[in-house]
Image (cartoon, helix red, strand yellow):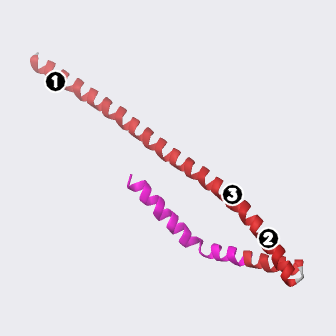
Amino acid sequence: MGVFEALHNTSENAINSGEQYVHATRSYYKLKAFKYLTKSLSSFILILSIGSLVSIGLIFLLIAITIWLSEVMDSVILACLILSTIIFVLAALVFISRKSIDRLVITKVGEDYFNS
């Protein structure tokens, strides 16, 4: 009976070790998911707050430039057209370079994701 009892004890120890491993692995992945969730959420909130403040600043800057340009050119309509053309050209440049921007973002996020 000693062999069967030793085999029983060994199998119970293996089962307990397996359960502990599963529990530790589950806890590790929960913690890792929490880390990425909080990092993503804090980055999103930061980008949203900075982006909104920069947008408000740009709106006031564009209004000031339009007023100044209209005084220089003596035409509000022409000043608005020139400024809107500049904005559309900048938007087109960003649209054209979107692939390189995507590549840069994916590279940066990939480094953070795979190195931690």
- Frontmost residue, 67 versus 13: 67
Secondary structure beneath label 2? helix
Of the image marks 1 and 3, the number of the one nearer the N terminus: 1
| Residue 65 higher or lower than 29, as above or below | below
- Residue projecting furthest to the left: 2
Pointers 2 and 1 in contact (CB under 8 A)? Answer: no
Q: In the image, what residue occupies the spot 24% across and 23% down?
A: 12
Badge 3, how many Cα within 10 Å: few under 14, some, many 20+?
few
* Marker count (numbered): 3
* Quadrant of the rendered image containing residue 7: top left
Magenta part of the chain: 88-116
- Frontmost residue, 15 versus 89: 89
| Residue 32 higher or lower than 24, as above or below | below
| Residue 8 higher or lower than 43, as above or below | above
Which amino acid type is marked by label 2?
A: Ala
Which amino acid type is marked by label 3?
A: Leu
Q: Residue 98: x, y in percent?
A: 59, 71
Q: Which mark is residue 7?
A: 1
Q: CA distance from mark 3 to mark 2?
A: 17 Å
Q: Which mark is residue 64?
A: 2
Residue 48 among those drawn in magenta? no
Q: Main secondary structure of the magenta part?
A: helix
Q: Identify the residue under disc 3.
A: 53
Q: In the image, what residue occupies the spot 23% across and 29% down?
A: 14
Q: Which mark is residue 32?
A: none
Q: CA distance from mark 1 to mark 3?
A: 69 Å
Q: Residue 45: x, y in percent?
A: 61, 50
